[in-house]
Amino acid sequence: MPSLRFTTTALAAGGIVQNLLTGSKFEYLPSPAAIIVYAVADAAGVQLELTFGNVIECDQMDLPVAAATVGPLISDHRVASGIAAAGDRLQIKLQNTGAGATNIRTFVDIRPL
């Protein structure tokens, strides 16, 4: 069961991360899997988009705000989940629509089926 943890530091206002998983071994899934994404930002205004292949699982989901040392907590910060097929490209896009730079913490749980 792969678990991936990402910290995006100081994403500028208006900044976009096209895909957190670019270059990862799990960008293209080797087998069918359940995907669960947990995420938090240090400030309001960060949105997340999650796609598997050609399926948009969530679009422009506002991330919860947590203190810099908190989260994402599995009990509180689940933002999206779904089932992806083998060979699907897993894409997690982040966009900061807020007024200033912020840090984002993301945890991706991949559970092969």
Image (cartoon, grey):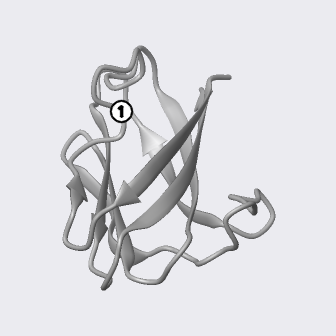
- The crowding category of the residue bearing disc 1, from other C-alpha atoms within 10 Å (few below 14, some 14 to 19, many at least 20), is some
Residue 83 pos. (x, y %): 47, 43
Relative to 68, is 18 on the left or the right?
left
Q: Report the amino acid beneath label 1.
A: Leu
Q: Is residue 5 left or right of residue 31?
A: right
Give above or below for 39 relative to 85: below
Q: Secondary structure at mark 1?
A: loop
Determine whether 34 is above or below 26 in the image.
below
Residue 99 spot, x, y in % from top left? 30, 85
The C terminus lies in quadrant: top right
Q: Is residue 67 left or right of residue 31?
A: right
Q: As drawn, is 72 to the left or to the right of 81?
A: right
What residue lies at 52% left-to-right and 31% top-to-bottom?
33
The answer to which image quadrant residue 20 occupies is top left
Q: Residue at x 49, y 58 (%)?
A: 104
Identify the residue position indicated by label 1 in the image. Answer: 21
The residue positioned 75% from the left and 63% from the top of the image is 70
| Above-or-below relation of 36 to 90 | below
Please state which of residues 63 and 109 is positioned toward the viewer in this rendering: 63
Q: Position of residue 27 (x, y in %)?
A: 34, 26
**Going by the picture, which residue comes out furthest to the right?**
75
Residue 30 pos. (x, y %): 41, 14
